[in-house]
Amino acid sequence: MAWTLQDYPASMKNLNEVTRKKAIDIANSMLDEGYDENRAIPIAIEQAKEWRKNASQQEVETYKQTGKPTKRSAEGKKYDNNPERLEEGEHIVSHEDGWAVRSSDGEKPSAVYQTKKEAVERGKEIASNKGTYLIIHRQDGTIEERYTY
């Protein structure tokens, strides 16, 4: 079932309009790719919240003005927090502002934390939710630990 801005899961009702729209886009894409609805909804909500937290105001405004979220568009594939990222593992890497959590092929981090411990906790949570893996890097970029979920 494809969701719309008028017909969406009850768990998305408390999201603001733009975040809900992004969550609907992600969930619809996941369903198209064969994900189970019960797995797609919480992952889509989490990814949409993360996108909103890290998106610039211009990105948010541009996204808000785009069409209705009923099917996957070429425009939707341009964003870093795509459903394709759900199959990728997470990495904890050194960042100029502390420690970053990013997906394997991600160009920019999904989040940056002041301490490595905070980044590792978040990375474990994301990788566990996605059922993928987490690789923790040392300050110099070498691999310190690997976890599979």
Image (cartoon, rainbow, N blue to C red):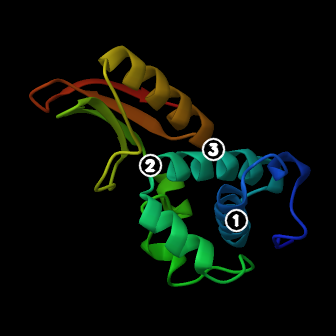
Residue 53 percent across, percent down from the top left: 50, 46
Instruction: Check disc 2 and give the amino acid type.
Output: Asn
Residue 25 percent across, percent down from the top left: 67, 68
According to the image, label 3 marks what residue?
46
Label 1 to label 3, Cα distance in Å? 13 Å
Instruction: Check disc 3 and give the amino acid type.
Output: Glu
Residue 70 percent across, percent down from the top left: 75, 79
Q: Is residue 33 above or below residue 13?
A: below
Q: Which is closer to the viewer, label 2 or label 3?
A: 2
Q: What kind of element bears circle 2?
A: helix
Question: Does the residue at mark 2 contact the one at mark 1 (Cβ under 8 Å)?
Answer: no
In the depicted view, which residue is nearer to us: 37 or 20? 20
Instruction: Check disc 1 and give the amino acid type.
Output: Lys
According to the image, label 2 marks what residue?
54
Which residue is drawn at the image coordinates 72% and 59% (left, top)? 35
Q: What kind of element bears circle 3?
A: helix
Q: What kind of element bears circle 1?
A: helix
Q: How many other residues sit within 10 Å of disc 2, few (<14), some (14-19) or many (≥20)?
A: some
Left or right of residue 48, residue 110 in this image: left
Q: Is residue 51 above or below residue 131?
A: below
